[in-house]
Image (cartoon, helix red, strand yellow):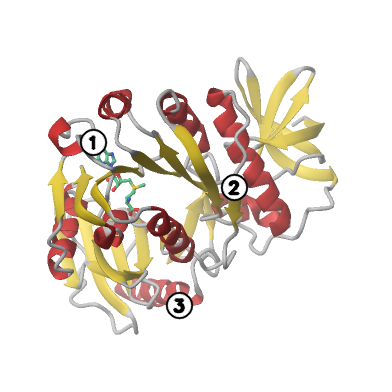
Amino acid sequence: MRLWPIKFEKIVSSGRALGKNCGKVVFCYGVLPGEVAEVKFVREKKDYIEAELVNVIEPSRFRILPKESHYLSCSPWQTIDYKYQIRLKADIIEEGIFQTVRKDIKLDSFYKAYNIYGYRTKIEYRLENTCSKLKYAFYKRGTKDLVLLENGCKLVDDKVNYIAYSFLDYLNSLDVGKEALEKIVFRKSTNGQVLGIIYLKNKIDIDIVMVPEIEDLAGLIVIADNNKKVYGRDFIEQDLLGTKIKYGYDCFFQNNIELFSKALEIVRNEINNVGKIVDLYSGVGSIGLSLRDSASKVYLVESFKNSYLYSVKNIRSLNANNVISIFSSSERVSEDILKESDVVILDPPRDGIKKIVLDKLLKILPEKIVYLSCNPVTLGRDLSFLLKKYSLKKIYGFDFFPNTVHAEVLAFLEK
Ligand SMILES: C[S@@+](CC[C@H](N)C(=O)[O-])C[C@H]1O[C@@H](n2cnc3c(N)ncnc32)[C@H](O)[C@@H]1O
């Protein structure tokens, strides 16, 4: 196996460091800008090479020791000093937007995380058998190989890991093999309730007769094919700026509650006393419901059935009589819903907004658009359309995912 010493220039939006070998681009996780590292080439493509880090020859002064041996699987930036992470992320956001907007857009502020570990509300563990015992594992980044975990992961708090391992002991006492198990997901609210969700490979054949006696394990959901068994509860209740929002075990929910609440607070301060708000990609209603007192009418639009159903439950339990939820994709939502809206909220998945939705917005022209994005590259692409008719009033970055390359961006647009 040949090893290559390479100087890496910067980190790109995928989170990998970029260097060059004889003029050809080399990407590698775990290397910092300015470092010289010995790497192993694992995949050679037409335009670039993917490499694996073997040894850092000239370390950056911002390099620190990772807290976990499996850090490359869950959070490759554990080796980067936090203050430097923030600088890198602000640059990555601005560069990501520049790629398509072709204008220098500077963030008005970048909000760093309150906690750089233990912040996630959701974690997904794979399983492996060693010495006839089940162990938790993650995928090795970019592969289907498993990396064993001895103590869970520090991206979730001690309580989640304690519950996860108590539950693993329980599964080991039932003598369940990994052949039966696809993955186990844990989700939690900030008040400490935890759900365990077990995905089986085939039909439900584990004899789990009851939720094991584990403090704060509020519910256990066993899923196989299209069957589901629920022990205890199958939803979580989360307080967001004083609004209690319920979401199902399989619904999208934000991972970093503290910083998401900060973003919501900023949106609430900007959007006041308006007529109609349409919250596209609304999930269970976290944003739209938090704005129910700021508008006379709020419409939620969501395409995932269970999230839509929870948005209806949330509307009822909050007595939010001015909020209506619509089960539809944003692409198919009727123009009657969008027209005469004062504010449209956009919080799409990483792929961003489909052209058909952007075209509708540019036709209907709501007064304001609030865009919360988890991908600066697709945000930039979508802004390059929206900026034909809108101007960018404010743009903020948030470190929802410390120790990873990911960042959230909140943009306010006005006609
Ligand atoms: C990033 S999440 C945001 C959810 C919500 N705003 C929140 O903060 O919890 C994106 C949501 O859009 C939904 N979604 C995905 N594609 C959609 C589409 N084409 N139309 C409507 N909703 C969609 C997903 O199910 C998910 O709930």
Report, in whole angstroms, how far the alpha carbon at label 1 lies from the one at label 2: 29 Å
Q: Earlier in the sequence, mark 2 or mark 3?
A: 2
Instruction: Sort mark 2 into few (<14), some (14-19) or many (20+) by Cα contacts within 10 Å.
Output: few
Q: Are marks 2 and 3 in contact (CB under 8 Å)?
A: no
Q: Secondary structure at mark 2?
A: loop
- Type of residue at label 1? Ser
Q: Earlier in the sequence, mark 1 or mark 3?
A: 3
Compared across the picture, whether 224 is left or right of 387 comes to left
Residue 291: image quadrant is bottom left
Compared across the picture, whether 62 is left or right of 131 comes to right
Q: Secondary structure at mark 3?
A: helix
- Residue at x 74% of width, y 44% of height: 32
Which residue position holds label 1?
Answer: 330
Q: Would you place residue 384 above or below residue 333 in this image?
A: above
Which residue position holds label 2?
Answer: 108
Residue 346: image quadrant is top left
- Residue at x 42% of width, y 62% of height: 265
- Residue at x 60% of width, y 26% of height: 103
Task: Answer yes or no: disc 1 within 8 Å of ligand 1.
Answer: yes
* Residue 248 screen position, x and y as percent: 23, 61
Report, in whole angstroms, how far the alpha carbon at label 1 lies from the one at label 3: 37 Å
Q: Nearer the viewer, mark 2 or mark 3?
A: 2
Q: Nearer the viewer, mark 1 or mark 2?
A: 2
Task: Answer yes or no: disc 3 within 8 Å of ligand 1.
Answer: no
Q: Nearer the viewer, residue 153 or 335?
A: 335
Task: Answer yes or no: disc 2 within 8 Å of ligand 1.
Answer: no
Residue at the extreme right:
58
The disc at residue 159 is 3
- Type of residue at label 2? Asp
Q: Are marks 1 and 2 in contact (CB under 8 Å)?
A: no
